[in-house]
Image (cartoon, rainbow, N blue to C red):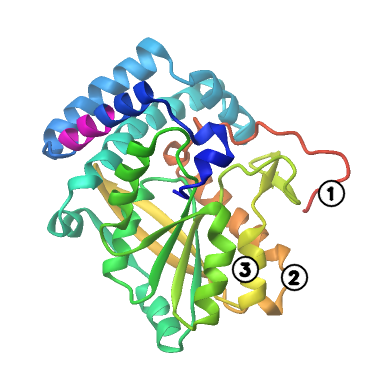
Amino acid sequence: MDDNLALKDKRYSEGFLKKNLNRLLAGFMFLFSLLPFPVIFLISDFLYFLIYHVFGYRKKVVLENLHYAFPEKSETERTKIAARFFRHFTDLMLESIKLHSMSEKQMEKRITFEGLDTIDECYQKGKSIIVLAMHHNNWEWCSFAQTKIKHLILMIYNPVRGNQAMEKFLLHSREKWGGKCIPVHQSARVALHFHREKIPTALWLGADQTPAATSKFWTVFLNREAPFFSGPEKIAEKTNQPVFFQHVTKTGRGRYLARFILLIENPKEIDSKEILRAYIRKMEKVIGKEPEFYLWSHRRWKHKRPEGIPLSL
């Protein structure tokens, strides 16, 4: 995290007591990451029971999101999807913690990649790429792709508010394979720096996150108006870097396949807004086929489009 960020924004600062409690939690997470997968999945089953059946964590949010996304489905069908989502969600949380201590041998057994040949062709031509990911299945483990591609992976992330210990824990998990995490407020500057230096990079963005309501790009996503970060299309248009879509599927419990699909080969040849539209259409198709693996607990549609900002269709 930017050392000055806590000084500029109070949301990122932490007092003495909070800092030490956060360190204690990070230490517990490290110890937890050392547990074998059979034990982790037993704990996940218990957490699922507590979160879904006892406490109902964000259950209302999940069901509301599913209601708008799938109005053609019955309430019973949407409730079944919600239950399957929460079962996956607890696995995902614990798999993300486990990543911190996973070895390369363990990762080789649990995640495979397709589409790397097309990415390698871009590298051979000296081209950087942009990878648009989504919060579907296990996106955290995809940082392991750095061991498979020659591009330097630049992972764009939002700094953790008021918890430096957690930030260090997450950065270690994501950067342990050689990639670099870049705070979102530095993403354009860093990406253009590597572009000018002619260093091939893979700019990795979970571009379905929620930006501020003042975002200039609003469109319909899963039957509701939603804002999107316009950074990916601006960087692609300026650099003409090929845009890939990351599609992760679950092949078994704690096992995934990540595909990299070429979405836009020459961004300068099309309307820049078509980049995000193509990405959103891909996401909707993926979610439609496997809805239980999308991050429905996220308050994705919390903003209302301000007056004066057009809807891009």
* Residue designated by label 3: 235
- Residue 37 place in picture, x, y as percent: 15, 39
The secondary element bearing badge 2 is classed as loop
* Residue designated by label 1: 310
Q: Is residue 126 magenta?
A: no
Q: Measure how far apart labels 1 and 3 are at the Cα level.
A: 21 Å
Could you tell whether 68 is left or right of 176 in the image? Answer: right
* Residue designated by label 2: 271
Residue at image coords 24%, 41%: 253
Foreground mark, 1 or 3?
A: 3
Foreground mark, 2 or 3?
A: 3
- Residue 168 place in picture, x, y as percent: 33, 44
Q: Measure how far apart labels 2 and 3 are at the Cα level.
A: 13 Å
Q: Is residue 41 above or below residue 57?
A: below
The secondary element bearing badge 3 is classed as helix
Look at label 2 and name its amino acid.
Asp
| Quarter holding residue 259 | bottom left
Residue occupying the far right of the picture: 308
> Which of disc 1 and disc 2 is earlier in sequence?
2
Q: Measure how far apart labels 2 and 1 are at the Cα level.
A: 16 Å
Residue occupying the far bottom of the picture: 125
Q: Name the foreground residue: 229 vs 313.
A: 229
Circle 2: is it few (<14), some (14-19), or many (20+) Cα within 10 Å? few
Q: Is residue 19 above or below residue 105?
A: above
